[in-house]
Image (tube, helix red, strand yellow):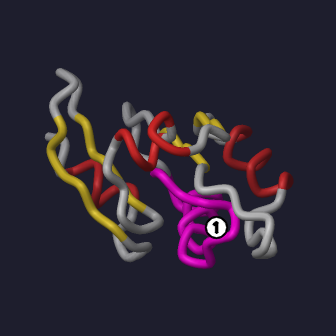
Amino acid sequence: MIGARWCPHCAASVARMASDDLPAGVDVVVIFTGTRSDVPEQIDDAAIFELRARGIAVGEDRATGDSSVVHRLDIESFPTWIVVDADGIVRAVETGDGSSIADLAAKAR
């Protein structure tokens, strides 16, 4: 998931990832980007710790402009889910917080 810590939809996705069963054999990676100092954060450090405790890799992109993840991957909204199969082929790109990890993982098969 590509998201932002200030994004309420991303916060809903993070809460679901922290509580839902994660499918076996599926790697989940979360990258927070789009840092904004003018908007309060919706996702605190405790939520990120919980994701990491569940084995979910979490990173933060603090780059701006052309070098940011948002620019390089042409992300237009948060959260954006990029489903990649075992061969590294992108199988789906979705936005929003509606799909479960299990539903997204099924698209990689």
Residue at position x 40%, y 37% in the image: 24
Spot occupied by residue 84 in the image (x, y as percentages of width and height): 25, 37
Residue 52 appears left or right of 74: right
- The relative height of residue 58 versus residue 3 in the rendered view (above or below) is above
Can you identify the residue that label 1 sits on?
Answer: 15
Residue 88 appears left or right of 96: left
**Split into 4 quadrants, where in the image is the C terminus?**
top left
Q: Is residue 105 magenta?
A: no
Spot occupied by residue 94 in the image (x, y as percentages of width and height): 27, 63
Residue at position x 46%, y 64% in the image: 79
Residue at position x 27%, y 45% in the image: 83
- The relative height of residue 47 versus residue 38 in the rendered view (above or below) is above
| Residue closer to the observer: 72 or 26 | 72
Q: How crowded is mark 1: few (under 14 residues within 10 Å), some or many (20 or more)?
A: some
Residue range (magenta): 1-21
Residue kind at label 1, given as amino acid type: Ala
Spot occupied by residue 8 in the image (x, y as percentages of width and height): 62, 78
Which residue sits furthest top?
A: 87
